[in-house]
Amino acid sequence: MSTLNRLLKVPESEITPEELYLSRRTFMRAAAAVAVGTVATAALGQGAGDAVDELLGLGDTDETPTDYEAITTYNNFYEFGYDKADPSRLSGDFVTEPWSIAVEGLAENTGTFSLEEIVGQFEVERRVYRLRCVEAWSMVIPWNGFMLRDLVTLLVPKPEARFVRFEAVYRPEQMPGQRRNLLPFPYVEGLRLDEAMNPLAFMATGIYDKPLKNANGAPIRLVVPWKYGFKSIKSVVKIGFTAEQPQNTWNVVAPHEYGFYANVNPNVDHPRWSQRTERRIGEFRRRDTLMFNGYGELVEDLYAGMDLVRDF
Amino acid sequence: MPAGAAAQRAGGRERAKRWRRVSHLALWGLSLAPAVVTLVHTFTDRLGVNPIETLTNRTGWWAILHLVLTLAVTPVRRLTGWHWLVRYRRQLGLGAFVYASLHLGVYAFLDLGLDLSHLVEDVLERPFMTIGFAAWLILLVLAVTSTNGWIRRLGRRWTTLHRLVYVAAGLVSLHFVWGKKTLQAEPLVFAGVFALLLGARALFSWRRRRAQKGQGAGRREAAPLA
């Protein structure tokens, strides 16, 4: 019996046989929706249980996925270097087995869990999402992984938890960009708890049905498709639940250029370049950037009444 | 004998002229080689995942390198006594202008697809773009007035006008440093080199002025300063 199950106080005899897994999962999600209703927005809490089954494959785009080669060799991952080719060229020393994630802060189930324990709790699904980098390029990526909300539900945030804080791995001996202090490492990102509970927020362990490559944030990373790429933190080793808004790395480095929310927004420019259009990797002409990267219908309620120019 | 010497001198002049022409052509070849290589890469699909970004970065880098070389001519001449270097300065400066134009051209034509309103917005509203564009404008004016005709026509004002190259170097440095998401070493190195070259020029002109003053006023007055 895994540590996680022990923490959840599930007796061995009650561990679900595989064939019953799906129905149990649906039940758990419905339960989760009710449990989280207190902290999440009303819209999310209400009817989220019924909607769960419809949400499978949610947000999937039918746009042509970007070439695997491009996805795995054109990356911003300053832990390895500034250049887009650095992560694929210089990540050979990075060891991702064994891997564990420390859960801390305002949650019932804190502790350190192996990657296998965590991933083993979920059925891996495929999500084809657009990824829009703050630098005005974009890709379409077929991810494999599971919903962040399922993980959060399993960890049971306390009522006073309002944010989820993610921390990436810090291993200067394996990561040349960390040795050169290219950013204040370890890299930190965060989401509001209701954002984390949005069914689009995803924990990815693979791309194109292959395990994540080091350059893409192996072995496990966050994917938040309606936000600029830098929010989707790679190689996660720590997940914390906090009452205060976490300080995300790019916001610390350049507060007037990168916000906490970092929602894709064609109407709020980066001070140095326009965010109105983007170049889809593999295409010649720029295309228009969509509000919330085209996921507005699924996420705009999270920001009702907020000034997205101020909270960029 | 005298007739032979004259012929020899004429032959020497001819040879020197020919050498100069060949050397200028060779330098153009060297200057434009990166552009040719890049063109080959463009048509053989070897510019990587984001070709337009690669083109933008490469042309910008070569523009800055040419600007550094142009501004290095005078200090290097002073230090080494290789006065012949000055013959190649104009050409290096034109090289900087060529690459800066390619850089702007790639951005305006390929990246923005000639979306003029986007370009105008960039130049007017984003200081990062404004200074890059201003630097290109300066290089444009300097390139146009780089001909012998303009040098004659402008006389002493030509020298003053062409000091704008240091303003361009400053703008370009800032543009390069600012073009990265964080403070990065490479643009800072270029900025430092520009600062050194400008410092060297300032030092030379200060020394020259001091020397002229020394000659005019005599040694007695210069002595207490020493």
Image (tube, rainbow, N blue to C red):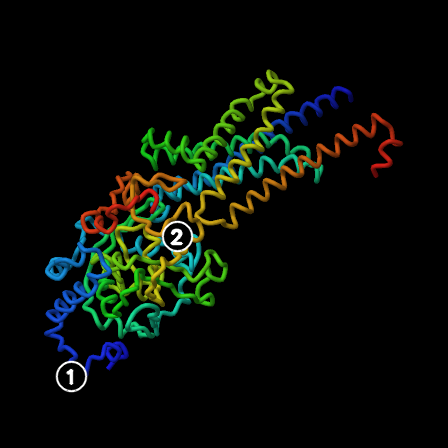
Classify 10 Å Cα crowding around label 2: few (below 14), some (14-19), many (20 and above): many
Q: Quadrant of residue A169?
A: bottom left
Residue B76 visible (yes or no):
no
Classify 10 Å Cα crowding around label 1: few (below 14), some (14-19), many (20 and above): few
**Label total for image:** 2
Q: Amino acid at mark 2?
A: Lys
Measured as percent of width and height from the top left, residue A121 is found at 21, 72
Q: Quadrant of residue A97?
A: bottom left
Reading the image, the residue beneath label 2 is: A84
- Residue A70 against residue A275 in the figure, above or below: below
Measured as percent of width and height from the top left, residue A196 is found at 26, 59
What numbered label is drawn on residue B28? none
Q: Quadrant of residue A94?
A: bottom left
Between tags 1 and 2, which lies in front? 1
Q: Amino acid at mark 1?
A: Ser
Q: Nearer the viewer, residue A165 or A37?
A: A37
- Residue B191 against residue A109 in the figure, above or below: above
Measured as percent of width and height from the top left, residue B184 is found at 50, 50
Question: What's the distance in space between the residues labelled 1 and 2, CA to CA?
Answer: 49 Å
